[in-house]
Amino acid sequence: MDSTNETAISEFLLLGLTEDPALQPLIFSLFLSMCLVTILGNLLIILAIYSDSHLHTPMYFFLCNLSFNDICISMTTIPKMLVNILTGDQSITYTGCLSQVAFVMLSSYWENFLFAVMAYDRYVAICHPLRYTVIMKPCLCVLLVLVSLFVSIVDALLHTLLLLRLSFCRDPEIPQFFCEFAQVIKLSCSDTFTDNLIILIAVCVFAGVPLSGIIFSYIQIVSSVLRMPSSGGKQKAFSTCGSHLSVVCLFYGTGAGVYISSAVTDSSKKTAVASVMYTVVPQILNPFIYSLRKRDMKVALRNLMDRIASV
């Protein structure tokens, strides 16, 4: 492309979900409500686990980290959108956009690894119950979380560094309510073949390996459960991993929906709506899934609410 069409840009434009002014108040109210529910729901999960000693187990330790990560995802994307609607200014600075890309990638990949770690925890609990406390020691649980976070940071930095070396065209408009990596890289005037190749390899490694671990863990879990002689034991085993399996299907299902939508349609608005399903819906539903499906969590939340009410 002609170099005259390139410029050292200082900001991007976030076009959001719609340009209709009449719908902006509705979208603002809807996303503000979803953000508050997400933060409150996940914060209650964290406080309930912290306040109940019976929940100081590896499974709930990982759930605490998952809830914290869900709060981070919501705080990374939604507040900027709300500010833009209030001010009528669709711009986001170049630095702010790249920072948003980095934090969204970090949170997404960390959630991916946390699901894999939680699947491994369920695999050990069901397939090796007598050795569970020996294998899932506190130091191992902390190490798994820290390694997952470190790898996610490395991958997020890789994506961000690839964007830093690109040149962008004038009027860089992003048909999203946040800076999504795939949409930002489409705006580049540079040759992005190498970048896309590196990203493809990174996705296969950093997303494919955890997903393979989840699939392997549940194959072993199902195989072990089917060999149990009593129906009661089977029901109890499936109930212990039912919540995790639900949120995993929700996370990967909405993520797959985003990429399928972007592949089969040229409509930027449909792609933006699909991204809402990926970056907002799982985070708001995770607390409800865990609190409704797990009796221990219901009791802990009830006790927490009683303590808050008595203050």
Image (cartoon, rainbow, N blue to C red):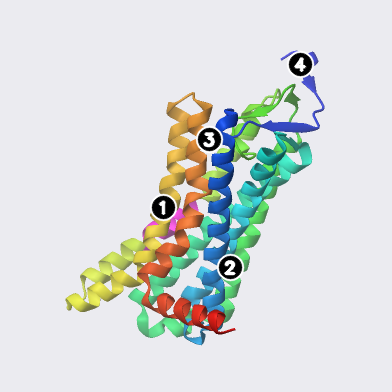
> Looking at the image, which residue is at 62% across and 47% down?
78
Number of residues whose C-alpha sits closer than 10 Å to that of mark 3, classed few (under 14), some (14–19) or many (20 or more) = many
For discs 4 and 3, the disc positioned in front in the rendered view: 3
Compared with residue 140, is residue 170 higher up or lower down, i.e. above or below? above
Please rate how many residues cluster around mark 4, counting C-alpha atoms within 10 Å: few if below 14, some from 14 to 19, many from 20: few
Q: Identify which amino acid the numbered label 2 is placed on.
A: Val
Q: Amino acid at mark 4?
A: Asn
Q: Depth check: 63 or 140 in front?
A: 63
Please identify, in this view, whether the residue under mark 1 or under mark 2 is nearer the observer.
1
The label on residue 145 is 2
Secondary element type, mark 4: helix
State the residue at coordinates (21%, 75%).
228
The residue indicated by pointer 4 is: 5
Residue drawn at 72 percent across, 42 percent down: 98
Locate residue 119, reporting x and y percent: 42, 65
In reply to whether residue 91 is colored magenta, the answer given is: no
Q: Is residue 180 left or right of residue 227?
A: right
**Which SS class for mark 3?**
helix
Give the class, few, some or many, for how many residues have Cα within 10 Å of label 2's Cα (few <14, many ≥20): some
User: Which part of the image, by quadrant, shows the C terminus?
Assistant: bottom right
User: Is residue 158 something that shows in the picture?
Assistant: no
Spatial CA distance of label 1 from label 3 is: 18 Å
